[in-house]
Image (spheres, rainbow, N blue to C red):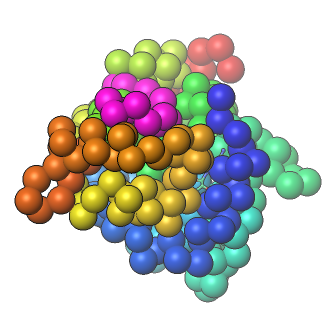
Amino acid sequence: MLDKQLISRNFSLSAQHYDEHAIMQREMADRLFSLLTTYDLQLTTILDIGCGTGYLTGKLAERFPSARVEGIDIAPGMIEVANKLKRENITFKIGDGEDIRGVGDEVWGMGEYDLIVSNASLQWMSVEKVFASVAKLLKPGGLLVFSTFGPKTLSELKECGFKVNEFPDTIAIEGLTKPNFQNIFLASQVSREKFGDVKELVYHLKELGAQTSAGENKFTPAAFRAYKQKYGGADGIAASFELVYGVFRRKPSPAGV
Ligand SMILES: C[S@@+](CC[C@H](N)C(=O)[O-])C[C@H]1O[C@@H](n2cnc3c(N)ncnc32)[C@H](O)[C@@H]1O
């Protein structure tokens, strides 16, 4: 069960320095941007779910200057940083990706968006709820383009007894999207990153605001040693990140919404 208050607080606390540490997230955003611009897009309305400091939102607003671009994030601190991005066609709001229709006092319209994106954020939400929300908010034929993390992410930490978030796999994503979306592209790849030691890895996750589950862990010297013995080498320790990318088209005839 994800604790939204804690997630919101942790990401707010990390917001000011987030961009310095979010190298992988930036690469994922660039890849997502390249992926989505391969499609023939006529866009007037775009939504970025879990927009963070607004890196991808800003790129989209620049690439599609006549579109109205909106970014929502559950962490007020992230929205505060994102709001420093001044572009006429962007609006940032505090909002919950699992329940996008009620943002603040407003109720957003059904079938309003041509494109909904989410970069490196869905792992913090119930994808089932987000896909249900997105199905309502996307225009028929509209695109959902996202990246997230798969279950092999931080598998080394998990094996050494640390608690790590649950991540849905591509089979689960396929099943959840099937009723309302056409699967256009879904792929995952595992990237092995190097860190000086386990403390550096944990510090890195903390600086990204991703310490929510890590906070429940007991970082005992024995657990650190076990990680180092299994996954360490002369150049530090390895940590896996499974990166999942998806492109889904909203089916023209709504099923169950
Ligand atoms: C790893 S950051 C990614 C931020 C940004 N998309 C990027 O590419 O850098 C994850 C973001 O998801 C946001 N988030 C987590 N749960 C959320 C929810 N239920 N609704 C909206 N945003 C959420 C966090 O506040 C955080 O800003």
> Which quadrant, please, contains the N terminus?
top right
Image spot of residue 177 (x, y percent): 47, 23
Q: Residue at x 60, y 71 (%)?
A: 15
The image shows residue 61, relative to residue 224, as above or below, that is: below
Image spot of residue 191 (x, y percent): 20, 48
Q: Looking at this view, is 148 or 154 the one in front?
A: 154
Q: Quadrant of residue 44?
A: bottom right
Is 194 a magenta residue? no
Q: Residue at x 64, y 58 (%)?
A: 10
Image spot of residue 57 (x, y percent): 51, 66
Q: Residue at x 53, y 41 (%)?
A: 217
Q: Quadrant of residue 223?
A: top left
The image shows residue 217, relative to residue 171, as above or below, that is: below
Magenta stretch in the rendered image = 158-170
The image shows residue 43, relative to residue 129, as above or below, that is: below
Left of 98 or right of it: where is 252? Answer: left
Q: Looking at this view, is 73 or 135 the one in front?
A: 73
Q: Looking at this view, is 59 or 254 the one in front?
A: 59
Q: Residue furthest front?
A: 221
Does the image show residue 12?
Answer: yes
